[in-house]
């Protein structure tokens, strides 16, 4: 009924902050559901965010004395709290609370002080106390009484003892720290003959409100004879003993003296019945010597001190027992390593987390005391993390720098906690932190640009090349898709030529390519990752179209379909240039390398075609038996595989007069122009050959002139006609006689500006052409792309030389066509 009455009165809780902590005070034995205080308000938390923050109390499930109502933030009693069971006789009883919110991770500390209520009555170990007192005991002799025990503390513990009224004894109260004991003091001498037994009632009263009490009956037996009791030098002995002292260690040697002799002075020592069971389990007392020794394992963390009551009694008749108290203080040694407990941890951290982001909350305890219980924790200094001390025994693991998953994706953080004892003890705890990826890296290609080759006439939709980009990120952030930027190549959208697989970067041809129309394609490939804020990179791809031998040679001159008809003088000498077959091939490289050969003729052994030059020349001079009309079929074949060829038919007329050749030369039609990109390369090649040939010819002529200068001063003629109106003109031919004063004697240099680009030398017999045997040098100039071809140039020129032979020694003429 008293407890029921106290509960409504003590339900009020006191809330205050100490060093940033919330502290409440409540009485013990409150029923479950009793409000302790508004923990959310006191911690500064919003009620609306409690559920989202997942506020909870961290404690042993078996010691879950409190819980928090997340609806109103009230701290409630979860089960009844027995202060005596929880804190024994400690003057203060505080339950520490660690309160954690997980979103975000925060740690709060609170304390609940359990106030004692007077719910236990003091009591004596035994309801009957027996004392044997000699009748010779002198007044003032003290007899320690077995002390009472009250589990309550403070004002609710033992306040005083009272003795029932009697004429021989009074009660004297002794206070040792928080403990109170009673001693029975003989006030008036005893007389066994008058009264051998005395019955006295001993009452113990606590300080609670209302008071509680307990009683014990004291039976005093008055003894006769042995009238001297042993005497201790001290009534209280104070001894210090280290914990974990080995079994058998001597704690103290007790010594009592007795003035009697014989058996009346033979003293033996005993543990008093007032000692708790722990004393008998941990210590032994040698009966004859009084040596108090360690019997069991002494743990400072369990017992800080012992109060041992020892009885000394002689062996005489009616021996009187005397008491002393041994106060045994236990010294702490560093025998407990720190205990590390992870109360909350975030095992995954984003790599873009700001410095100071909380990762884990760590609680560290050490059962030792003093310096042995002072703990320091640290982690390796090279890690981008640090430990911050939040409260005593509590640390927060936070980031101290920027994290990069691409450098380190996982951290094994070893937390080392060491106490300050000697020698120090340590404990380590490993926390594994995984760094989660964010999209902070763009894709990249292994090359700044790519070049691929595709054979022309390829199959549409065929795979021609593959490129690949990489991304240092993970999962979706590294998933790359490919696309071709929509640009134009030669006025046509690139996407009409090529396409790309968005998944693997394989490039496909959208059409069949023709090398003759397109030599290369350049386009940009874009690689884009799959992150929320995606990154991209581009690379240039140069696609080179390779030539295939798919074009047969095309004969540009002479054209058989135009009725190509050439007149050749019967007097033509061996090696006479009849005509030059000019052909072109739209392919390139070996596919455009042409060869010429004569495959059909009326008379064998007369004509031959230069394999690479296409020049048709006479092998021998014409005879009277040779036909006047000749039909030649010339095949032009490229060097591709398989080789392609074209033929042309040339009609030749062997004439006896030069006038016919000359008139034919004047009427040569202008050849049709066929512009081609190949012409540029042919011009360069033939121009270089012509230049080298000219140098060789000039050197040769110079050598010849030097040799014959003394004998033939008139053998080298400079042809020139001063009257421009007398120039030999033809709209299709441009002969030019060189006016260089250094020309070699017996040499005539003729330059042409048509499509025939090679330098030709002709030997004119002196008896038929000139009296000096002049050598004719015919140089052909002009870009081949204009395709102005000259036919039967050497025949026409030979005729002209014949008509001018008599004047060559006197004039220097310039002939242009």
Image (tube, helix red, strand yellow):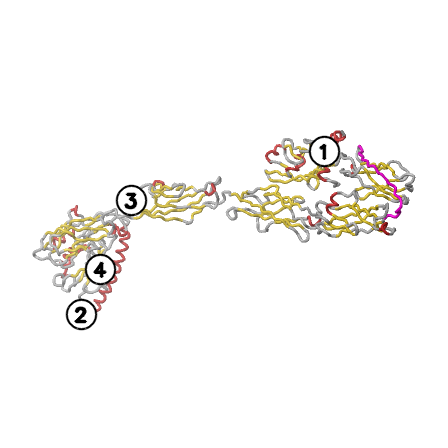
Of pointers 2 and 4, the one earlier in the residue sequence: 2
Q: Magenta segment: does it hold 669?
A: no
Q: Is residue 70 visible?
A: yes
Disc nearest the viewer among 4 and 1: 1
Residue pointed to by mark 1: 29
| Comes first in the chain, label 2 or label 1 | 1
**Residue 461 location (% of width, % of height):** 33, 41
Position in image of residue 172 (x %, y %): 86, 41
Task: Assess whether mark 1 and mark 2 are in contact (beta carbons under 8 angstroms).
Answer: no
Q: Is residue 813 left or right of residue 398?
A: left
Q: Give me the residue at 37% from left, 43% from top.
A: 507
Per the model, the C-alpha gap separating discs 4 and 1 is 134 Å
Q: Quadrant of residue 655?
A: bottom left
Q: With 130 as the anchor, is 374 left or right in this view?
A: left
Q: Quadrant of residue 577?
A: bottom left
Where residue 457 is drawn, which disc sits there?
Answer: 3
> Which residue is tagged 2?
711
Is residue 222 highlighted in magenta? yes
Element at label 4: loop
Magenta range is: 210-229
Could you tell me which secondary element the residue under label 2 belongs to? loop
């Amino acid at each position: 009924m008293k407890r029921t009455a106290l509960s409504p009165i003590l339900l009020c809780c006191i809330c205050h902050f100490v060093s940033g902590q919330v502290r409440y005070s409540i009485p013990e034995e409150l029923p479950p559901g009793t409000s302790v205080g508004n923990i959310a308000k006191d911690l500064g938390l919003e009620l609306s965010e409690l559920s989202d923050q997942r506020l909870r109390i961290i404690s042993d499930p078996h010691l879950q004395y409190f819980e928090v109502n997340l609806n109103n933030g009230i701290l409630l009693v979860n089960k009844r709290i027995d202060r005596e069971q929880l804190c024994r006789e400690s003057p203060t009883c505080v339950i520490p609370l660690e309160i954690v919110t997980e979103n975000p991770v925060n740690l709060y500390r609170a304390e609940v002080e359990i106030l004692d209520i007077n719910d236990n009555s003091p009591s004596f170990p035994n309801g009957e106390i027996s004392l044997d007192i000699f009748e010779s005991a002198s007044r003032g002799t003290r007899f320690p009484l077995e002390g009472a025990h009250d589990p309550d503390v403070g004002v609710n513990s033992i306040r005083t003892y009272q003795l029932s009224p009697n004429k021989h004894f009074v009660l004297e109260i002794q206070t040792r720290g928080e403990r109170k004991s009673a001693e029975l003091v003989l006030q008036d001498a005893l007389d066994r003959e008058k009264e051998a037994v005395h019955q006295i009632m001993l009452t113990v009263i606590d300080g609670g409100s209302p008071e509680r009490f307990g009683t014990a009956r004291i039976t005093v037996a008055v003894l006769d004879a042995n009238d001297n009791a042993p005497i201790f030098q001290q009534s209280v002995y104070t001894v210090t003993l280290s914990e974990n002292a080995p079994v058998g260690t001597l704690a103290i040697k007790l010594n009592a003296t007795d003035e009697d002799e014989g058996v009346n002075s033979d003293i033996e020592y005993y543990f008093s019945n007032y000692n708790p069971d722990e004393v008998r389990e941990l210590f032994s007392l040698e009966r004859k010597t009084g040596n108090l020794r360690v019997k069991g394992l002494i743990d400072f963390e369990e017992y800080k001190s012992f109060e041992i009551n020892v009885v000394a009694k002689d062996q005489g008749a009616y021996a009187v027992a005397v008491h002393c108290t041994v106060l045994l203080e236990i010294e702490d040694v560093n025998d407990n390593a720190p205990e590390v407990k992870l109360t909350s941890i975030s095992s995954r951290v984003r790599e873009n987390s700001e410095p100071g982001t909380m990762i884990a909350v760590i609680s560290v305890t050490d059962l030792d005391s003093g310096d042995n219980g002072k703990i320091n924790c640290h982690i390796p200094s090279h890690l981008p993390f640090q430990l911050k001390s939040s409260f005593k025994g509590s640390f927060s693991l936070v980031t101290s720098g920027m994290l990069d998953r691409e450098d380190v994706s996982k951290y094994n953080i070893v937390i080392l906690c060491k106490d300050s004892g000697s020698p120090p003890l340590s404990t380590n705890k490993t926390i594994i932190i995984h760094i989660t990826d964010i999209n902070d890296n763009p894709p990249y290609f292994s090359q700044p640009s790519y070049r691929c080759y595709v054979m022309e006439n390829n199959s549409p939709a065929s795979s021609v090349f593959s490129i690949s980009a990489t991304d240092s990120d993970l999962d979706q952030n590294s998933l790359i898709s490919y696309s071709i930027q929509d640009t134009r190549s030669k006025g046509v959208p690139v996407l009409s030529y090529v396409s790309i697989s968005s998944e693997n970067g394989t490039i496909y041809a959208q059409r069949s390519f023709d090398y003759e129309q397109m030599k290369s394609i350049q386009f940009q490939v874009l690689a884009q990752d799959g992150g929320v804020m995606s990154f991209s990179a581009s690379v240039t791809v140069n696609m080179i179209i390779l030539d295939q031998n798919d074009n047969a040679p095309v004969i540009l001159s002479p054209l058989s379909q135009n009725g190509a008809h050439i007149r050749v003088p019967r007097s033509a000498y061996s090696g006479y240039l009849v005509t030059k077959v000019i052909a072109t091939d739209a392919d390139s490289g070996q596919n455009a390398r042409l060869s010429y050969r004569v495959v059909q003729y009326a008379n064998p052994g007369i004509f031959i075609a230069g394999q690479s030059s296409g020049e048709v020349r006479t092998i021998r001079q014409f005879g009277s038996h040779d036909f006047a009309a000749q039909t030649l079929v010339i095949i032009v074949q490229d060097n591709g595989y398989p080789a392609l060829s074209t033929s042309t038919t040339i009609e030749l007329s062997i004439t006896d007069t030069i006038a016919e050749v000359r008139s034919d030369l004047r009427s040569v039609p202008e050849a049709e122009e066929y512009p081609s990109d190949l012409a540029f390369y042919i011009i360069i090649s033939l121009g270089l050959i012509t230049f080298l040939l000219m140098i060789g010819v000039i050197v040769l002529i110079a050598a010849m002139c030097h040799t014959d200068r003394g004998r033939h001063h008139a053998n080298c003629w400079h042809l020139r006609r001063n009257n421009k109106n007398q120039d030999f003109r033809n709209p299709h031919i441009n002969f030019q006689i060189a006016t260089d004063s250094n020309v070699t004697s017996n040499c005539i240099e003729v330059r042409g500006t048509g499509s025939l680009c090679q330098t030709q030398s002709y030997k004119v017999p002196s008896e038929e052409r000139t009296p000096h045997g002049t050598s004719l040098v015919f140089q052909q100039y002009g870009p081949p792309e204009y395709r102005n071809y000259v036919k039967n140039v050497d025949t026409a020129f030979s005729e002209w030389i014949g008509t001018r032979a008599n004047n060559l020694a006197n004039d220097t003429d310039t002939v242009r066509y």
